């Protein structure tokens, strides 16, 4: 029996030493020390021994049990230690690696240009307002002195939603909304998206942006218009910039003009930028037509005003010397990052 005991003990310890995994250790514990384990069954066979032999054998069994338990404990902590080392090794952080680059977006040249235009006009006491992109025919045309069948409608060939709703072709309708709702005097700019059924090319897009301007009050004259836009041009394109007012026609202003600025690239001598003329056209403007004032409930005998409309893309393209408008809508960060 003693030999048997020794054999069990040796076998248990050998198995423990070669277990290699925590789970296996548990199985070994059960198979040797468990209720139906080998050590337990040898304990049970003690009844076959003489009473004199029993205590000594009992002690031996207890010792074997203690040895097996110790071996189990030792192996358990050594395996746990190994597992922890392995985990630490796999989670190691190399602090010398370069940091992962965070890709931060970039403001669109349109947004940068709009901020600049807003800054200039807010500095002159203007308020920034907005109007709807889905607009009534009345605001886009009718109230701007462009009745049905007026040829100006063809020029702005429009996306209609139904007989009297459309995607606005110009921000000028915001003039009317503002005159209908705001107390006089009025001094606003109204930036926003406009839509026309134009083919996409280097200078056209079916959706682009305008900034409308409107001033209405007592004794507003063409001199105010000229002074305001000349100051705007100087702030936007540089102190040396000169403006030229060319007579033009818009149905909602009378008189009307287009404004050219001296080319900021060549200073007026003529270059590729200004196509050799020394001048660059930047906006349309005029004195608000009496019909337009009247339709919005303002007495043209008492009040007068001026208005202007600027293409935002045009300003951005000029300012940043971008030669193809399509680049503005491609959202290529390599392009956007340059401004
Ligand atoms: N709405 C005009 C256009 O889209 C631009 C314009 C011209 C606006 C003259 C104005 C203005 O306010 O007075 O072509």
Image (cartoon, grey):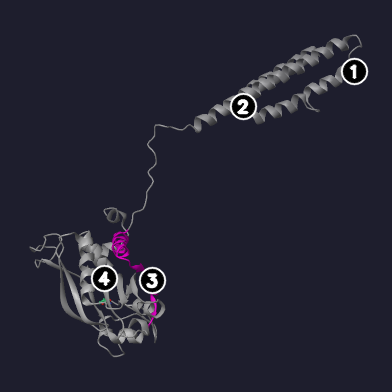
Left/right of residue 322 with respect to residue 181 in the rendered view: left
Density class for disc 2 (Cα within 10 Å; few <14, some 14-19, many ≥20) is some
Residue at figure coordinates x 25%, y 87% from the top left: 151
Which numbered marker is on residue 80?
2
Pick the residue in front: 321 or 14. 321
Quadrant of the displayed image that contains ligand 1 = bottom left
The N terminus appears in which quarter of the rendering? top right
Q: Are marks 2 and 1 in contact (CB under 8 Å)?
A: no
Distance from disc 1 to disc 3, alpha carbons, whole Å, reads: 102 Å
Q: Nearer the viewer, residue 17 or 173?
A: 173
- In the image, taking residue 158 as reference, residue 68 lies left or right, namely right
Choose the circle earlier in sequence order: 4 or 3: 3
Q: Is label 2 in a helix, a strand or a loop?
A: helix
Out of 91 and 336, give the one closest to the viewer: 336
Q: From where the camera sits, is residue 37 visible?
A: yes
| Foreground: disc 3 or disc 2 | 3
Q: Name the residue under label 4.
A: 310
Q: Give the range drawn in magenta.
A: 108-136
Task: Find residue 274 and report its horizontal and vertical position in percent.
Answer: 13, 65
Number of other residues with Cα within 10 Å of mark 3, as a class: few under 14, some 14 to 19, many 20 or more: some
- 188 in the magenta segment: no
Q: In this rendering, which labeled residue sits more in front, label 2 or label 4? A: 4
Q: Do tag 1 and tag 3 residues touch (Cβ < 8 Å)?
A: no
Residue 328's image quarter? bottom left
Q: Marks 4 and 3, Cα distance to the nearest angstrom?
A: 15 Å
**Element marked by disc 3:** loop
Q: Ligand 1: does it lie within 8 Å of the C-beta at label 4?
A: yes
- Label 1: how many Cα within 10 Å (few below 14, some 14–19, many 20+): few
């Amino acid at each position: 029996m003693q030999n048997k005991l020794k054999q069990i003990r040796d076998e248990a310890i050998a198995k423990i030493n070669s277990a290699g995994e925590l789970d296996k250790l548990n199985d070994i514990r059960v198979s040797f020390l468990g209720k139906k384990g080998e050590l337990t069954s040898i304990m049970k066979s003690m009844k076959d021994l003489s009473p004199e032999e029993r205590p000594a054998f009992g002690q031996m069994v207890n010792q074997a049990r203690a040895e097996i338990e110790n071996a189990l404990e030792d192996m358990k902590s050594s395996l746990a230690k190994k597992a922890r080392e392995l985990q630490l090794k796999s989670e190691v952080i190399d602090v010398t690696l370069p940091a992962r680059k965070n890709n931060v977006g970039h403001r669109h040249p349109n947004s940068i240009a709009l901020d600049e235009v807003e800054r200039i006009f807010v500095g002159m006491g203007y308020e920034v307002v907005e109007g709807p992109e889905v607009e009534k025919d009345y605001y886009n045309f009718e109230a701007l002195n462009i009745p049905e069948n007026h040829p100006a409608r063809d020029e702005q060939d429009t996306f209609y939603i139904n007989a009297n709703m459309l995607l606005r072709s110009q921000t000028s309708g915001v003039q009317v909304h503002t005159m209908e709702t705001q107390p006089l005097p009025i001094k606003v700019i109204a930036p926003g998206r406009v839509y026309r059924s134009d083919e996409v090319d280097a200078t056209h897009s079916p959706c682009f942006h305008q900034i409308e301007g409107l001033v209405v009050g007592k004794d507003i004259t063409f001199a105010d218009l000229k002074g305001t836009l000349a100051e705007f041009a100087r702030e936007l394109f540089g102190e040396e910039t000169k403006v030229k007012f060319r007579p033009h026609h818009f149905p909602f202003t009378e008189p009307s003009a287009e404004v050219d600025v001296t080319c900021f690239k060549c200073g007026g001598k003529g270059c590729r930028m200004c196509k050799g003329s020394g001048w660059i056209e930047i906006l349309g403007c005029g004195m608000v037509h009496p019909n337009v004032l009247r339709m919005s409930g303002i007495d043209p005998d008492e009040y007068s005003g001026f208005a202007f409309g600027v293409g935002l893309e045009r300003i951005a393209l000029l300012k940043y010397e971008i030669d193809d408008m399509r680049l503005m809508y491609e959202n290529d960060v390599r392009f956007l990052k340059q401004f």
